[in-house]
């Protein structure tokens, strides 16, 4: 644009204003170009340009670029954008955003706030959501305040040792006291002791109890063992009742407990091993030492401590059943008191095949418990009494006959003397027959039992599928053939006597497709099987296999242990 409004005069004297010059021509104004921005002064209508504010293109996008502070003319009067005409994004930093007295800045991807964060309305907003929770919250030293429905404030804090406390009290259905953890990112379901109430509030039986909890399950699942009252005194034990009559012996029993091990040529067995006092000639050993940890990593100390003098131990080649050693526990075992093994005094009974096992050879240890001795049969009938001795053969002399008949005398009132007893013993009567053994339901024996042989009834099952009843009252060993599917073993007529253990053994004759008892019930109630090694077995086709369950009844509940071995 051209044309001046008048000549410039001296700064000392100012002449009259000249006449207005002709209107200058406009330079065409383009779009989309670059260069300095032009401003008009509202006071004198003059236009100005400044290099601090430019119009430029960046990656094909037109921009206004400023090289100076952007400050409003009047404090707290103007807005940057407005409702319905908002800026899309704001890029700030390194630096800070000042809102009132609060300052927001950033370090990397972390937002730093100098000031408090408060919602615009009470009890309305949420920090995080169900699908987008915060992973961790760090706070304190300070407190977590939770306002209740009545307005009362629950305050949770931490002491100098990191122990959480609730100032006003703490209420929960139960408290789980478990082991220490190195990390709590994903601890699973923690086991330990559960403390909590039982019964109905207000009833006389309402109690505070403690009970053990297995890991891996949520309460009320996983509770096991006896229940202990924490507030009710334990009463005195009543007098012991009279001992009932001894019942007859049941059928001969045997144990099917067995464990996986390896042979060890050292004096002290390594974990999962058995050692002999004479490894070179094992049959001449006087003791064996058995690690309390078997090859599956299971601690069987409690089962080894059940073995007593008079029990039999069989050590067998795991792969060849014809190779074995049989031993009698001939003395009191020495339990594991920190040595890591149990020592059994033994006497060699017999062996089969190649029975001197090499170092680290795979073997199994089977325990045969003694069955009770049958009750004594009734006393035989008393023999017949011998015959009376024969009369005397000596006759006294006969007096001479009187020729005068005397008067008849009165009857004598005196009885003559009894003759002396015979000195001849009559023959002994025949011996009465031997009494027979009467079969009765059960018998309890307190003390050590010793028997010579064992014999047990085997029940036969054919074509197992679905749920198959196994009547324990008729025997504890079952022979399965022609199975058509994996099945449920339902053990029936099993006594529920506290602190007692029971065993059931299944002989599985496998065909081209192998099956087994994959689930266990007791009287129709499903049980959790704690498998040896922690994993359910895989049956093998065309093999002869043994599956056994040891069932422990304690605290009104069953605990079941499963074992599985393949042969042939």
Image: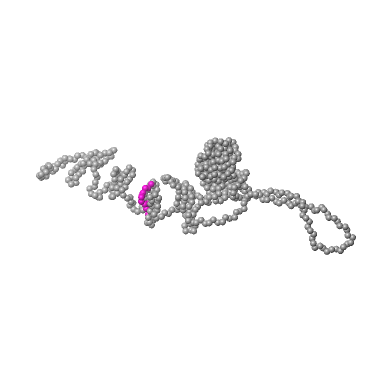
Q: Nearer the viewer, residue 365 or 416?
A: 416
In percent of width and height, residue 205 lies at 49, 57
The answer to whether residue 467 shows anywhere in this view is: no
Residue drawn at 52 percent across, 47 percent down: 559
Residue drawn at 59 percent across, 49 percent down: 447
The answer to whether residue 233 shows anywhere in this view is: yes
* Color style of the picture: one colour
In percent of width and height, residue 413 lies at 80, 63
Q: Is residue 167 magenta?
A: no
* Image position of 131 with respect to 396: above or below: above
* Image position of 217 with respect to 284: above or below: below
Q: Is residue 56 left or right of residue 241?
A: left
Q: Main secondary structure of the magenta part?
A: loop
Q: Is residue 47 left or right of residue 562?
A: left
Q: Nearer the viewer, residue 34 or 404?
A: 404
User: Residue 19, located in which quarter of the rendered image?
Assistant: top left
- Pick the quarter of the image with the C terminus: top right
In percent of width and height, residue 552 lies at 54, 48
In percent of width and height, residue 271 lies at 50, 40
Q: Residue farthest to the right?
A: 403
The residue range painted magenta reads 136-147
Q: Is residue 14 left or right of residue 399?
A: left
* Image position of 249 with respect to 280: above or below: below
- Pick the quarter of the image with the N terminus: top left
Q: Nearer the viewer, residue 345 or 250?
A: 345
Residue drawn at 51 percent across, 39 percent down: 270
């Amino acid at each position: 644009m051209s044309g001046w409004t008048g000549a410039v005069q001296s700064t000392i004297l100012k002449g009259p204003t000249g006449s207005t010059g002709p209107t200058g021509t406009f330079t065409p104004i383009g779009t989309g170009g670059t260069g300095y921005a032009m401003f008009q002064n509202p006071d004198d209508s003059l236009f100005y340009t400044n290099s601090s504010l430019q119009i430029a293109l960046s990656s094909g996008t037109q921009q206004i670029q400023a090289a100076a502070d952007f400050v409003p003319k009047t404090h707290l009067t103007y807005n940057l954008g407005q409702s319905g005409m908002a800026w899309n994004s704001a890029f700030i930093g390194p630096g800070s955003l000042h809102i009132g007295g609060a300052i927001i800045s950033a370090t990397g991807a972390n937002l730093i706030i100098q000031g408090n964060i408060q919602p615009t309305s009470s009890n309305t907003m949420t920090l995080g959501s169900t699908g987008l929770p915060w992973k961790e919250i760090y706070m304190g030293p300070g407190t977590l305040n939770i306002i209740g429905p009545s307005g009362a404030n629950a305050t949770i804090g931490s002491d100098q040792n990191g122990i959480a406390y609730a100032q006003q009290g703490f209420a929960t259905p139960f408290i789980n006291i478990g082991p220490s953890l190195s990390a709590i990112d994903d601890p699973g379901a923690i086991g330990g002791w559960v403390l909590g109430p039982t019964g109905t509030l207000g009833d006389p039986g309402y109690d505070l109890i403690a009970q053990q909890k297995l890991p891996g399950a949520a309460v009320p699942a996983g509770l096991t063992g006896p229940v202990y009252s924490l507030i009710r005194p334990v009463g005195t034990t009543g007098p012991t009742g009279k001992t009932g009559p001894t019942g007859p012996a049941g059928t001969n029993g045997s144990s099917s407990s067995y464990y996986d091990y390896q042979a060890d040529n050292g004096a002290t067995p390594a974990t999962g091993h058995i050692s002999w006092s004479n490894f070179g000639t094992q049959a001449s050993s006087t003791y064996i030492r058995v690690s309390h940890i078997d090859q599956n990593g299971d601690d069987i100390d409690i089962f080894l401590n059940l073995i007593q003098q008079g029990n039999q131990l069989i050590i067998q080649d795991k792969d060849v059943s014809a190779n074995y050693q049989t031993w009698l526990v001939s003395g009191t075992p020495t339990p594991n008191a920190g040595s890591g093994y149990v020592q059994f005094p033994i006497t060699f009974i017999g062996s089969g095949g190649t029975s001197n096992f090499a170092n680290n050879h795979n073997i199994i240890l089977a325990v045969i418990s003694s069955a009770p001795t049958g009750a004594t049969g009734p006393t035989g009938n008393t023999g017949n009494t011998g015959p009376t001795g024969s009369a005397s053969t000596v006759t006294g002399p006969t007096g001479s006959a009187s020729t005068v008949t005397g008067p008849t005398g009165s009857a004598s009132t005196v009885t003559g003397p009894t003759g002396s007893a015979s000195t001849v013993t009559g023959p002994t009567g025949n011996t009465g027959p031997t009494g027979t053994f009467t079969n009765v339901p059960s018998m309890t024996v307190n003390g050590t039992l010793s028997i010579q042989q064992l014999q047990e009834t085997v029940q036969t099952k054919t074509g197992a599928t679905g749920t198959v009843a196994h009547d324990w009252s008729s025997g504890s060993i079952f022979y399965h053939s022609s199975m058509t599917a994996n099945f449920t073993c339902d053990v029936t007529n099993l006594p529920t006597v506290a602190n007692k253990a029971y065993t059931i053994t299944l002989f599985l004759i496998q065909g081209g497709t192998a099956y087994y008892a994959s689930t266990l019930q007791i009287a129709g109630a499903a049980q959790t099987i704690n498998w040896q090694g922690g994993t359910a077995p895989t049956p093998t086709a065309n093999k002869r296999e043994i599956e056994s369950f040891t069932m422990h009844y304690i605290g009104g509940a069953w605990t079941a242990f499963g074992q599985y071995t393949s042969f042939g």
